[in-house]
Amino acid sequence: MAKPLIASSAHLAGGSAPDLSEVEFGLMIASHAFNRWTVRCMAAAGLPDLTPTDVMVVHHVYHRQRPKKLADICFTLNVEDTHIVSYSLKKLERLGMVRGQRSGKEVFYSVTPEGAQIIQRYAEIREQCLTSGLEAPGSGGLEFSRQLAHALRALSGLYDQAARAATSL
């Protein structure tokens, strides 16, 4: 007897790729859990009231500690609407986490020293609360994490291509 699929939408599980519905359900619940985690970890680090996008933006601005343009932040994070990232950057500026420096027509964003302290605290809390779970029996460990990261990037490309195709219908 076939194992029943765990899907949020049975009508999508009946097509030519029923397992994809199960993957999509897993993506939905994982994305909500991940968003909840990032917001709560950042609150524990000392910066409450951020959205998942705000957390994602501040981490990317800090990445390699090089100033970044709005367009580059959006491109890297795969955010189509620049207004969403722009709003986060303004909010993070008001909170003293990032600063914008104008260079010609462009504004380059970098993390402030205070922002860097919060991000370092986030990393400590992440190490304490999350990464220890990767070592638990049955977790699959680091190799599983690498394979999952590769699969998620591949799925991202698949869904981006499907979104482009859907706009021409």
Image (spheres, rainbow, N blue to C red):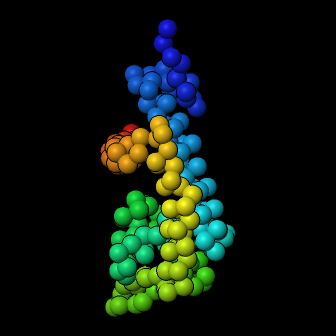
Q: Residue furthest right?
A: 49
Q: Quadrant of residue 101?
A: bottom left
Q: As rendered, which of 80 and 122 lies closer to the eye?
A: 122
Reply above or below: 77 against 102. above
User: Does residue 163 show up?
Assistant: no
Residue at 38% x, 48% y is 142
Question: Residue 49 at what x, y percent from top left?
Answer: 67, 69
Reply above or below: 111 against 38. below
Counting the numbered discs, the total is: 0
Residue at 51% x, 27% y is 12
User: Does residue 42 show up?
Assistant: yes
Does 156 sit left or right of 82 as displayed? left
Q: Quadrant of the C terminus?
A: top left
Q: Residue furthest top?
A: 1
Question: Residue 20 at what x, y percent from top left?
Answer: 43, 31
Q: As rendered, which of 75 and 155 lies closer to the eye?
A: 155
Question: Residue 57 at what x, y percent from top left?
Answer: 48, 69
Does 124 sit left or right of 66 as displayed? right
Residue at 49% x, 8% y is 1
Residue at 34% x, 48% y is 146
Question: Residue 165 at what x, y percent from top left?
Answer: 35, 42
Reply above or below: 113 against 16. below
